[in-house]
Amino acid sequence: MRRSMRMNMSAVGNIHSLLARLLPAQVIVSPAVARRQRLFAGVGMPSQRTMLVSRLDEASDLQAVYQDLRLQALQGNVAALNDLGWIWLNGKYWRADTVLAGHLLRMAALQGSAVAWFNLGQQHYFGKGVDRSYTQAAECYRQAFERGMSHAAAALGDLYEEEVCDGPMQWQVDPQLAYRWFLQGAEQGEARCRFEVGYRLIHGLHVQPELKPALYWLELAAAAGVVQAAEELAVHFSRRDQERYQQWRDRAVQMGSTLALTMKLEDQVQP
């Protein structure tokens, strides 16, 4: 046990020693490029999400923000390490370096960061600084899911339904496996996965149609704000139950659905 703890501490120490050599003293910021890329959401996600993005968007001195993140990373903050990797992966706030990004993200991932595993999946999916590989992306997404990131199940479900139409990359579409990943995400509370499961069950898409569980998952997804789920419920009940149809149609309208608004306007002009 003690030997294992010493080995883990040694590994972490090696990471921090390497990190001190990898992270530059300053970053190369191009204000003109930074302004253009404010509208670019990028791939992957930072650990600190909204707080970090707001801080970067509003920063008058990006070097100061970088120095703070660098210090946090050197002090062992895995979230800061992932966030630096995410920024270098996208090149949104300072010049991109996808090779450095990959090193930082893998360091964060090996220290247990689910978000870093997800970002590595995104790097392999889009081929940013690495060969594009759905197989590698799937493995990284799986690691992220196993570490508590339910959103990774949606990425896996999408991946196993995506056909590769050009290029040399080998990939096998598997709709049943995609459904199983969506179901795992749904069971963990991931809203979009709940919609995907409900949609497949109500239409019998690659699974046997089952109305009761389909409505269950769609209602949970709609309650979590997935507008497509509310639309699907409105369409379903339009032929069966006028009271529930109007309830879901109006809920979808409130959520911003143009489809539901069209349905409501058509209902108003019908005799």
Image (tube, grey):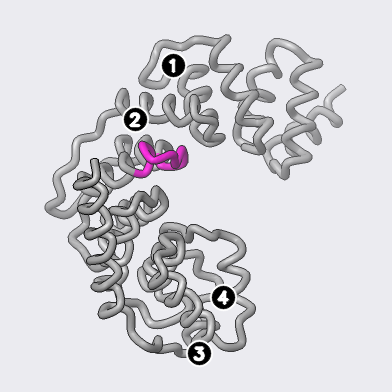
- The residue indicated by pointer 3 is 32
Secondary structure type for disc 2: helix
Q: State how far apart marks 4 and 3 are (Cα).
A: 15 Å
Q: Is residue 131 magenta?
A: no
Image x and y of residue 160, in percent: 30, 36
- The residue indicated by pointer 1 is 204
Quadrant that contains the C terminus:
top right
Secondary structure type for disc 3: helix
Image x and y of residue 50, in percent: 60, 61
For marks 3 and 1 on the same chain, the one whose residue lies earlier in the sequence: 3
**Tag 2: Cα neighbours inside 10 Å, few (<14), some, or many (≥20)?**
many
Question: What's under tag 2, amino acid-wise?
Answer: Ala
Left/right of residue 175 with respect to residue 149 in the rendered view: left
Q: Which residues are magenta?
A: 144-152
Q: Is residue 145 magenta?
A: yes
Secondary structure type for disc 1: loop
**Tag 4: Cα neighbours inside 10 Å, few (<14), some, or many (≥20)?**
some
**In the displayed structure, would residue 157 be above or below residue 206?**
below
Q: State how far apart marks 1 and 4 are (Cα).
A: 45 Å
Secondary structure type for disc 4: helix
Question: What's under tag 1, amino acid-wise?
Answer: Gly
**In the displayed structure, would residue 185 be above or below residue 104?**
above
Image depth: mark 4 or mark 3 in front: 4
The answer to the question of whether label 1 and label 2 lie on touching residues, with beta carbons closer than 8 A, is no
Q: Which mark is residue 178?
A: 2
